Structures are given as C-alpha cells and as structure tokens.
Amino acid sequence: MRKLGNVLYVTSPDTFLGLEDEALIIKREEQPTKKLPLLNLQGIVCFNYTGVSPFLMGACVERNIGLTFLTPNGRFLARVNGPVSGNVLLRKKQYADSEDDQASLAIAKNCVFGKIYNQRKVLQRTQRDHALLVDAVQFEQVIAEMKELMLKTREATTKADLMAIEGNAARRYFSLFDQMIFHQKDHFFFRERTRRPPTDPMNAILSFLYVLLANETASALEAVGLDAYVGFFHTDRPGRKSLALDVMEEFRPVLCDRLALTLVNRKQINGKGFSIKESGGVLMDEETRKAVLVAWQEKKKEELMHPFIKEKMPYGLLPHIQALLLARHLREDLESYPPFLWS
C-alpha cells in the first residue's frame, strides 16, 4: 500500500526554492532561510513566481517528487516530469483503448456513473443531516431524478449521449448547491457553476480545489505508468490532462464540494478574503488560500473504507487506488473499471 506523503504548498509569491545536500531550501526576503528534508515529501506545489533552482528540479525528478507550478491565483501552469515510468505495453493499451469507441465508452460510463452516484450521495447526506434547513420536496425530487440519470449512463451508446446525461445530472445537483450553504449567505452563494474566471467566492473555492485534485490525480496516474493526458471521456487537447479529468470526476463531490461547503459553513474562511477584478473574476487572498490548503491537507488524512478493495485508507490515497484499478483493467486483470462509490 502506498503511503500518504507530505505535500509542500509554497503560497508566498516572493519565495525561492533551492537545494542543499538532501534538504529543500526556502528563501524569502527578510525572512530566515528554512530547510526541509526531501525524504518525506510526496509533492511540491508552487504558487510563487520567484523561481526554483534546476538542482532542486533534478532532485525532485530523481526522487519521484511531484513539482507543480500554479499562478498565485491557482491556475495551472506546468509540471516537472522525469523519464516516463511504467510498462510501455500498458500505455500502448491505453492509447489503443482511447481510440476504440466501445472500449473508451465503457470506462467513461463508469466514471460518470461514479460521479452522479457521489453527487446524489452528497444530497442525501445533506437531506439526512440538515432536514430542517433545506427544501425537502426539492431534494427528494432531484435525488430521484439523479437516480434515473445514474442508471441511464448504462444505456448510453455514444459519448455524446453520456455527456448529455452528465450535464443534466450536474445541473440538477448544482441547482441545490445554494441550499447547502447555511452561513455567511451575504458573501457565499451559488447561482451557477462559473469558471475561467469564477465570478463569486464559492465558485472560486471550487475551482481552486478542483485544480489541486486534478494535479494529484495526474501524479497518481503517472505513478502507475499511465499517460495523464490521454483520456476516455474528456476530449484530448494539447496540454489538457484528459485522463486525470476523467478519473477525478468521481472524487469531486466527496473531496472538493463537501470541503468547500464545510469551510464556509464552519466559518473557517470569510468573505473578506476575496476580491473582484475588473474582468469580474473573483480571487482569493493569500491567507484564505493558506486556510483552504490546510483544510485540504487535513481532509486527505481522514480515513474511509474503500468499497471495492475493502481496505481502510486516507482520502488522499483515493486517486492512487483508482489509478491502480484502472491500470489493472487495461491489463485485463479486471473485467471493467470499478469507480469509487462513496458510502
């Protein structure tokens, strides 16, 4: 079983990262230099624009430490990768299946089934735990409709059919999202899902968490020898991690959506941590970003029983387990890809 390692998030834009012996050096103007051993690091995510030394990049590649660069606002820029690992036969099978309409549709259907199942489960949990705070009739109706859509994924004969089903389910799910925000309604509300840029604080939190999840899912896929850029549901585009987007669909409701709601409802963040640009986009300030990252790291440490492999594990290992299961399916050790179904 893979161990959940530490991920270092560098949030200060004026920070420079270097290497000294086996230690990561963190330099910042008018701040004492800090050292961290590379031994227990699983990844480094940089929001800084000052830079990272080539020596540190090389050390990360040698030690299989993920090194990712994001803008200070959380938009993905690049990842540093070493030599491609894994069995070349596995990647050839992945590429072949991605070009096979029926093989790729079978995997895509399971990914979307898992996403709708978990979205529906989030609504059911809210209905059960906060029955007096939500519209019970609306929740019952949408939960029933999403069950129908979930089952319809099995009947889809094309990716276009599947995309329509996934879109309908997302609209129904997000139509109730605002009701799941119980506090700080003056600042945090949800009208519709907006991205590039997000136009309200709640969408800004969701987009930020989705970027973090996509990065970790891509790392997990590459760790088992798969190509994170060649997917089965999302269309291949230059620079787009299509397979990571496919696989992370199952985790978004459980890991990202619920965490965003928790941060707001428990008042761990507030509306003062957001600003509006001239373009209408909403940005998080550094302190709010840090609070979200701390909560993200803590969420990944929480444990659950995986429904397929029947082992207890931290949430942070879910992308790695699903990557392994997908690889096993492509090798034909499993008849189909088993999506993660939250219980």
Image: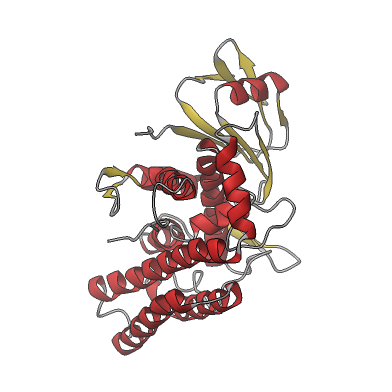
Q: Which residue sits furthest top?
A: 21
Placement of 38 over or under 219, stated as above or below = above
Placement of 295 over or under 101, stated as above or below = above
Placement of 228 over or under 112, stated as above or below = above
In this image, 117 relative to 220: left or right?
left
Question: Could you say which is closer to the camera, residue 120 or residue 160?
Answer: 160
In terms of image quadrants, where is residue 160? Answer: bottom right
Q: How many labels, in total?
A: 0
Q: Position of residue 35 (x, y in %)?
A: 54, 18
Question: Could you say which is closer to the camera, residue 11 or residue 321?
Answer: 321
Which image quadrant: the C terminus?
Answer: bottom left
Q: Position of residue 212 (x, y in %)?
A: 54, 49
* Residue for point 76% across, 66% down: 278
* Residue for point 31% across, 89% down: 137
Q: Position of residue 253 (x, y in %)?
A: 42, 63
* Residue for point 65% across, 33% down: 81
In this image, 105 relative to 131: left or right?
right
Question: Could you say which is closer to the camera, residue 262 or residue 221?
Answer: 221
In terms of image quadrants, where is residue 335? Answer: bottom left
* Residue for point 45% across, 75% down: 153
Placement of 87 over or under 250, stated as above or below = above
Can residue 201 be seen in the rendering of this structure? no
Can residue 49 be seen in the rendering of this structure? yes
Question: Could you say which is closer to the camera, residue 147 or residue 107?
Answer: 107
In this image, 212 relative to 335: left or right?
right
Color theme of the render:
secondary structure
Which image quadrant: the N terminus?
Answer: top left
In this image, 127 relative to 48: left or right?
left
Q: Position of residue 226 (x, y in %)?
A: 56, 43
